[in-house]
Image (tube, rainbow, N blue to C red):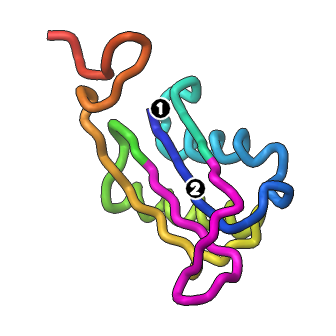
Amino acid sequence: MPHLTLHTNVSRDEIPDDFLTTTTKIIFEMIGLPEKYIVVNVIPDQIMSFGGCTKPCGNAFLTSIANLGVQENKNLTKAIMEHVKKTLGIEPTRMLLTFNDAKGMDVGHNLTTFAPDQ
């Protein structure tokens, strides 16, 4: 159930049509959870600055029930930021990526949660 949300001041018309699918594949390859549960959400055209400057920037949040940790988060940061720089032109110095290691009981899907049955 990884969920990446990216807020950016990049305009909608500058986001490639395949950005969602290519980002999903990166997350799938890095985290290894079923691709059918990965959500990628881009919120473009935001009025935002980074460090007081309005050049292209982003603020992202990645939540996952599993497969996050110190080294995993470093690897994900590198892969996602390189991808965002290549496709959206946002320099890694102009973006934050915040991780949330959620518990299964805190995420609902398909009329239940991801908590293990007891």
Residue at 59% in and 42% down = 40
- From the image, state whether disc 2 or disc 1 is nearer to you: 2
Q: Which residue is mark 1?
A: 33
CA–CA distance in space, label 2 to label 1: 20 Å
Residue at 47% in and 32% down = 33
* Depth check, front residue: 117 or 8: 8
Residue at 70% in and 43% down = 20
User: Does residue 52 appear left or right of residue 101 in this picture?
Assistant: right
Residue at 85% in and 56% down = 13
Residue 41, picture quadrant = top right
Dot 2 falls on a residue whose secondary structure is: strand
Q: Which mark is residue 6?
A: 2
The correct choice, above or below, for 71 with respect to 37 in the image is: below
The region drawn magenta spans 42-62
Which image quarter holds the N terminus?
top left
Q: Amino acid at mark 1?
A: Leu
Residue 46 placed where, x, y %? 64, 64
Q: Give the class, few, some or many, for how many residues have Cα within 10 Å of label 1's Cα (few <14, many ≥20).
A: some
Indicate yes or no whether the magenta region holds residue 6.
no
